[in-house]
Image (cartoon, grey):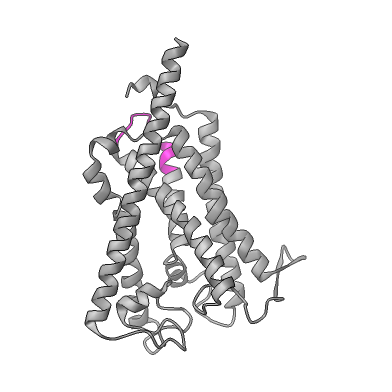
Amino acid sequence: MNNKLLPKKSKKNIFLLSAIGLLHFCCITMAAHLDLFRRSEYSFASASNICYWLWISSWWCIWVGWLTIIWVIYKLTKKAKKSYFEQIFDLTVLIANLLMILAFLANFIIYYFWKVEWIYVPDTDNPHRVITLFNSWPVKTQTYFWFNIAISHIVVPFIILYHFLKFSQVDLLRKKFRTTIVSILANPAVWFLFVIIREKISNYWIHPNKLSYEFPRNYPYVFFYRIMGQQAYEKDINYSHSLVSRFLWLLGTILVAGLVFSLLTYFLIKWKEKINHKTLKNNIMKH
């Protein structure tokens, strides 16, 4: 693609990037604020405790929030010259955020229709519990929770999608498509290893006798518990210590993740290419 067609760092581009970074930072702060409020009886739940921040960052939404903030800083400070790294970084952040839309829908549907215990919705046993904001504004904790994840899981991903379609490029991703398919799995792989390693170190040094489902929970999602052969919640009877069962869960997780990320990668690149082609055609017709 002609470099003359590459979008410059326009005011709109800068505004969108700044808004994305600010919104994600606010959502991380709100999530931690609510969790610290609800866990105030635990010494572990402290804003000054680095181990707490590592634990809360094991949740996909917080992990993606930090990743997106790093991406925003990179985009705002980088030089105009395009690179494969920038394009794969753009796509990585977009896919990570789009998956949060699926997480939001799954969280909402599974909890409100099936009432599964491990789905994280705060204060289900006390829906009228309130948290006071700015020392004067009482808000129900569930309202606070749903407002926060609506922003981080719905609004921000769509803003990033718009930014990707408007400003990002995919020509180098298309030329190295096989490399792209492998590279796009780097983020979920690093996150997976972070979650596993963090739990092992934390439970060895800080919580040696804690049950797997007690606060702070060993893992953010049930498939981690199945892979590690641990109870996801107190009444969980479906876990197994069998190495075969754990291996099958690990294999299934890898296959599902590979399929989802690969399909999203292919679809988003094709979609962006169509938009680029249409834009190029319109520019030619104007001249």
* Residue 78 visible in image: no
Residue at point 34%, 53% (across, down): 261
- Magenta residue check for 80: yes
**Quick check: 87 above or below 277?**
below
User: Which residue of the protein is positioned furthest toward the top in this rendering?
Assistant: 287
Q: Position of residue 209 (x, y in %)?
A: 38, 90
- Magenta residue check for 76: yes
Quadrant of the rendering where the N terminus is positioned: top left
Q: Quadrant of residue 240?
A: bottom left
Between residue 28 and residue 212, name the one nearer to us: 212
User: Which residue of the protein is positioned furthest toward the front in this rendering?
Assistant: 113
Q: Position of residue 50 (x, y in %)?
A: 44, 69
Residue at point 50%, 56% (across, down): 101
Q: Position of residue 2 (x, y in %)?
A: 33, 21
Would residue 155 appear left or right of 248 to someone viewing this image? right
Specify the segment rendered in magenta. Answer: 73-83
Would residue 181 appear left or right of 51 to someone viewing this image? left
Residue at point 59%, 74% (across, down): 122
Q: Quadrant of residue 82?
A: top left
Quadrant of the rendering where the C terminus is positioned: top left
Between residue 236 and residue 37, name the one nearer to us: 236
Residue at point 41%, 14% (across, down): 284
User: Which residue of the protein is positioned furthest toward the right in this rendering?
Assistant: 136
Q: Position of residue 151 (x, y in %)?
A: 58, 54
* Residue 163 visible in image: yes
